[in-house]
Image (cartoon, rainbow, N blue to C red):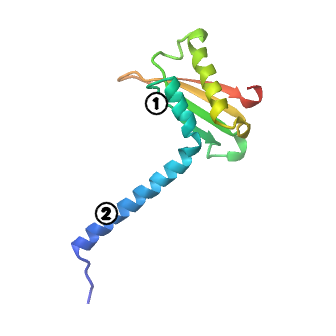
Amino acid sequence: MQKTISGRTVVFGMFGFAIVMTAILWLYWDAYTAPFRPLQYAINDAFPGSGPRVVGGKQKKHKDEYPEILRIVIRVDFDPNEASEEQVEPYTSKLLELAKEHVDLTEYEQVEIHLMHRVPESETELKKFDFPTAEL
C-alpha cells in the first residue's frame, strides 16, 4: 500500500524550503558585502544617487593568475568614455580617498574604479580605471 502526503503538508514544505533558502541567500549576501558597507555608505554620501557597489577579492576562474582587486562601481550622469580628464578626475580621486579611509588597501594589489552611465534603451557606457595599490 502506497502512503500519500496531503496537499497541506506539501504546501507548508514548499513555503518552509523557500524561507530557508531566502535566509541562506540573505546571510551569504550579508557576509559577502559587510566588509565594504562602510565604504559604500561613504561613497553614497559623497555622490548621492550613484548606487555604489563595492566588492573585493580575486576572479573565481584561475584564482592564481589574478591579483586581489577592490572593485568600486558607481553611476554617473555623463558618458565617461567621452568625458575629459578634468571631468573624471574628481570622481576617481575622491573614490580613492574614501577607499583609503574605509578599507585596508594593503590586502589588495589593485583598485578598479568603474564609472557607469546608463542610457535608456541603449548600451550602458562604462569606463574602467586601474590603480595599483603600491602607488597609492
Q: Quadrant of the C terminus?
A: top right
> In this rendering, is residue 113 above or below 60?
above
* Quadrant of the rendered image containing residue 55: top right
Left or right: 50 as drawn, with respect to 106 = left
Query: Mark 2 or mark 1, which has the lower sequence index?
Result: 2
> Where is residue 39 drawn, in percent x and y?
57, 34
Residue drawn at the location 63% of the way across and 46% of the way down? 61
Residue annotated with mark 1: 51
The structure residue drawn at horizontal position 77% and vertical position 30%, both measured from the top left corner, is 134
Secondary structure of the residue carrying numbered label 2: helix
The residue sitting at the right extreme is: 134
Q: Amino acid at mark 1?
A: Gly
Front-lying residue, 83 or 91: 91
Residue found 71% across the figure and 40% down from its top = 107
The answer to whether residue 4 is left or right of residue 54 is left
User: In this view, which residue lies farthest toward the bottom?
Assistant: 1
Residue at the spot of label 2: 15
